[in-house]
Image (tube, helix red, strand yellow):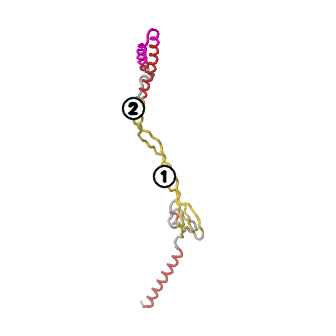
Amino acid sequence: MNKSMIVGAVLGAVGVTAGGAVATYSLVGGPEYAEVLAVQPVKETIKTPREVCKDVTVTRQKPVKDQHQIAGTVLGAVAGGLLGNQVGGGNGKKLATVAGAVGGGYAGNKVQENMQAGSTYTTTETRCNTVMDSSDKVVGYDVKYQLGDRVDQVRMDRDPGSRIPVNDQGQLVLVQNQIAQ
């Protein structure tokens, strides 16, 4: 091989390679992108019910065996009658006995009633109620973008980053698997 033939072959190879590179660059110019100007998360408040229980101390009245305070009334009447019988004489004694029995019966009734009301016990009970917990969930993103001279906004299901791909028709590619189309 002579020298001019080698130089020609090299120049030919360089020319073919450069031409192929220029043709490939013009065909595969790469995807065009819209520039993202602002991204604002869109949130939704979620309310979730939750049961909260706590133990509380409760004071209760003990069950009453003698609900009408009959024992106190009878004992008071007997005691009052005995005391009234000690007063006076004749018909006055009878009247004092009856009055003592009536007064003693009333007093005995009230004494037993107060004793029963003060007879209590304490216990622990569990009390529950429902409270609502609030939390924020991101449901999308409002994206402000610029494509050429046009500024617009679109809602997306993800944060696109700094740019959004554009297809051959000049439309935004909002779903990631559409980029290859």
Q: Is 78 in the magenta?
A: yes
- Label of residue 135 in the image: 1
Q: Residue at x 45, y 91 (%)?
A: 4
Return the x and y of residue 155 as percentages of the image width and height: 55, 60
In the rendered image, which quarter is residue 90 located in? top left
Return the x and y of residue 111 as percentages of the image width and height: 43, 24
Return the x and y of residue 165 as percentages of the image width and height: 53, 67
Residue type, label 1: Ser
On the image, numbered disc 2 is attached to which residue?
121
Q: Residue at x 48, y 52 (%)?
A: 135
Q: Which one is in front, 41 or 6? A: 41
User: Marks 2 and 1: which is nearer the front?
Assistant: 2
Please state the extent of the stretch shown in magenta in the rendering: 75-95
- Crowd class of label 2 (few under 14; some 14 to 19; many from 20; radius 10 Å): few
Q: Quadrant of the N terminus?
A: bottom left
Q: Is residue 44 left or right of residue 87?
A: right
Give the mark, 2 or 1, whose residue is nearer the N terminus: 2
Q: Which one is in front, 131 or 92? A: 92
Residue type, label 2: Tyr
The correct choice, above or below, for 5 with respect to 173 in the image is below
CA separation, marks 2 and 1?
Answer: 43 Å
